[in-house]
Amino acid sequence: MVLKTMWRRHRILTYLKSGLISKGYNFKSLSHVNSQLEILNTLIKEESFDVLNKLLFEKTNYRLLKQIEKGQENLIKIIDCPEWWRLCKVNEHCEEWLNRNSLLFSTEREILCFTLNDYGQKYISNKWQ
């Protein structure tokens, strides 16, 4: 999966950048790594949107994804093990804004969330129902 490779490279570049900063490299030396991280962030955002849009179309009744609000790094885990995740509405469970293990996104009508908590729609028969 392309998205998984992008996240792996993002973690490597972030680790490299923090190592270079701790060794005292200046901003000019880090500009190449920073530019690669900026490009990678843009590509990850676009690919995450496409992957989530496809997931919603194929495995839920929700359509018309507007944007990903929070937690796009959890999208790979949702794709790999969907039976662990639940789909719920955020207006019923506001604490999901603070949860690190959630993916919040907005559709045309409402804000929804994939979460590891025990409420919401379960993944049954290859769909969230």
Image (tube, rainbow, N blue to C red):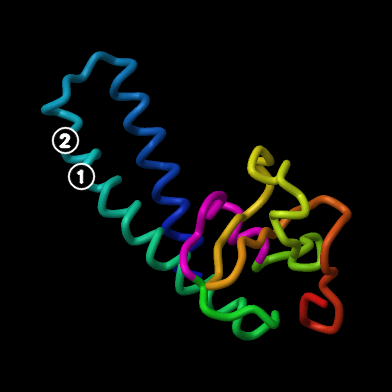
> Under tag 1, what secondary structure?
helix
Vertical order, 54 against 9 (above or below):
below
Mark 2 belongs to which amino acid? Answer: Ser
Amino acid type, residue under disc 1 in the picture: Ser
- Closest to the observer, 101 or 120: 120
Badge 2 density bin: few <14, some 14–19, many ≥20, Cα 10 Å = few
Q: Position of residue 101 (x, y in %)?
A: 68, 46
**On the image, which quarter does residue 5 sit in?**
bottom left
Secondary structure at badge 2 equals helix
What residue is at 27 percent from the left and 47 percent from the top? 38
The reply to whether dot 1 and dot 2 touch (C-beta < 8 Å) is yes
Residue at coordinates 47% horizontally, 63% vertically from top-left? 67
Residue 35 vs 111, above or below: the answer is above
Give the labeled residue for mark 1: 35
- What is the total number of numbered labels drawn onto the structure image? 2
User: Which one is in front, 118 or 51?
Assistant: 118
Q: Position of residue 13 (x, y in %)?
A: 35, 41
Q: Is residue 72 left or right of residue 32?
A: right
* Residue 108 is inside the magenta segment: no
Q: Residue at x 54, y 50 (%)?
A: 70
| Residue 32, image quadrant | top left
In the figure, residue 58 lies in which quadrant?
Answer: bottom right
**Segment colored magenta:** 66-78
Q: Residues within 10 Å of mark 1 (few under 14, many from 20)?
A: few
Q: Position of residue 117 (x, y in %)?
A: 82, 50
Q: Position of residue 43 (x, y in %)?
A: 34, 61
Name the foreground residue: 41 vs 4: 41
Within the magenta stretch, is there residue 74? yes
Q: Relative to 101, say whether 92 is above or below.
A: below
Instruction: Give the residue drawn at x 75%, y 62%.
Output: 88
Q: Which mark is residue 31?
A: 2
Q: Marks 1 and 2, how far apart in space?
A: 6 Å
